[in-house]
Image (cartoon, grey):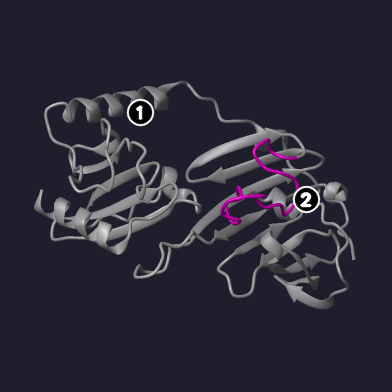
Amino acid sequence: MASEPTAALPALTGRYRAVRPRVGNGPGHPPAEDVETVILFAFRAPSLWRHEFRGRVAVAETDFPPWVEPGLSFPDSGWPWRFDPDPARLVVPTLSELPPGRPTEYGGRAAVLTEMAGPEGTPLDLVVDDRTGMVLRASAPGSAYVEELSDLAFPETLPDDRFVQPEDDGSADRAELLRWERIREHYRTRPLPVPASWPGPLGRPGPIDGDPDTGFVVVDLDNEPAEGAPTAAQLVRQPLGESPYLAGWALNPGYHLQRWRDGRWQWTLVLSDHPLSVGQLRLVQEDLSSG
């Protein structure tokens, strides 16, 4: 079977959810945390999109947003689940010829359950909408990977004002600049949490996010090249009662995440290429707990 083009679909609204498995940290470490992304979207043929994600709205007037390759594509190298989540991957899937499937139902819609080859030959199970050719759900058995559509509605059309980018008067940027200046000023006269036992030399670590009132801070450790050390790393300190840090680099499933708690703080390391070993991590934890 081959998917039908969604261009015949006049309009669509719904909820897109993706779960991307995160690269693991190796023996002796807890299982890696997966990365979940939820986007509320609206689509109007042939090319209008509206996304709502993490409190922000993005509007694009193109067949595919420029940061997304058409269809269910995956990176050619590196961590295979490091794709950019986007409902266009399922709504306009541009699938090649698929093997015959069996009838099923998903979300109250008639569908066909079939399969295709995923990254590195991983088999993917697909639930394809019988009428539109949309992929309602994609998953990889034995993996946490999922992309799915839900809460779908099929209006005859959607008004123009649904696809207008909210005006930006610059106030958010000014507030962010003031916040950043406050963080930088705070740490001009106060020490940052920087582990002395880091497995490699550090340049000039500096704060890139935080809240001086609570002690929350994100530190760019400014790694210098060294064998056995990550190429780049960020260290996050948070109060124990806050939700674990999940922003910036931590949203990339190709980056390693190592978390722990002590008597005062919760900590997160975000590492660009490889994690700390159990022994390296233990030394860092001891440094920070005694600091």
* Real-space Cα separation, disc 1 to disc 2, in angstroms: 36 Å
Tell me the quarter of the picture where residue 72 sits.
bottom right
User: x%, y% of residue 141?
Assistant: 63, 74
Judged left or right of residue 31, residue 9 is right
The verdict on residue 82 being magenta is yes
Q: Residues within 10 Å of mark 2 (few under 14, many from 20)?
A: many
Q: Nearer the viewer, residue 200 or 204?
A: 200
**Three-letter residue code for mark 1:** Glu
Q: Reply above or below: 161 against 6.
A: above
Q: What residue is at 24 percent from the left and 50 percent from the top?
A: 238
Q: Residues within 10 Å of mark 1 (few under 14, many from 20)?
A: few
Question: Which of the labelled discs sits on residue 114, or is there none?
Answer: none
Judged left or right of residue 138, residue 178 is left
Secondary structure predominantly adopted by residues drawn in magenta: loop
Q: Secondary structure at mark 1?
A: helix
User: x%, y% of residue 2?
Assistant: 89, 61
Q: Which residues are magenta?
A: 64-84
User: x%, y% of residue 82?
Assistant: 57, 51
Q: What residue is at 43 percent from the left and 64 percent from the top?
A: 32
Question: Which of the labelled discs sits on residue 176, or is there none?
Answer: 1
Residue furthest to the left: 290
Q: What residue is at 55 percent from the left and 54 percent from the top?
A: 38
**Three-letter residue code for mark 2:** Val
Disc 1, disc 2: CB below 8 Å?
Answer: no
Q: Reply above or below: 65 against 262.
A: above
The verdict on residue 255 being magenta is no
Q: Earlier in the sequence, mark 1 or mark 2?
A: 2
Tell me the quarter of the picture where residue 45 sits.
top right
Quadrant occupied by the N terminus: bottom right
Residue beneath label 2, please? 92
Q: Reply above or below: 285 against 291.
A: below
Count of numbered marks: 2
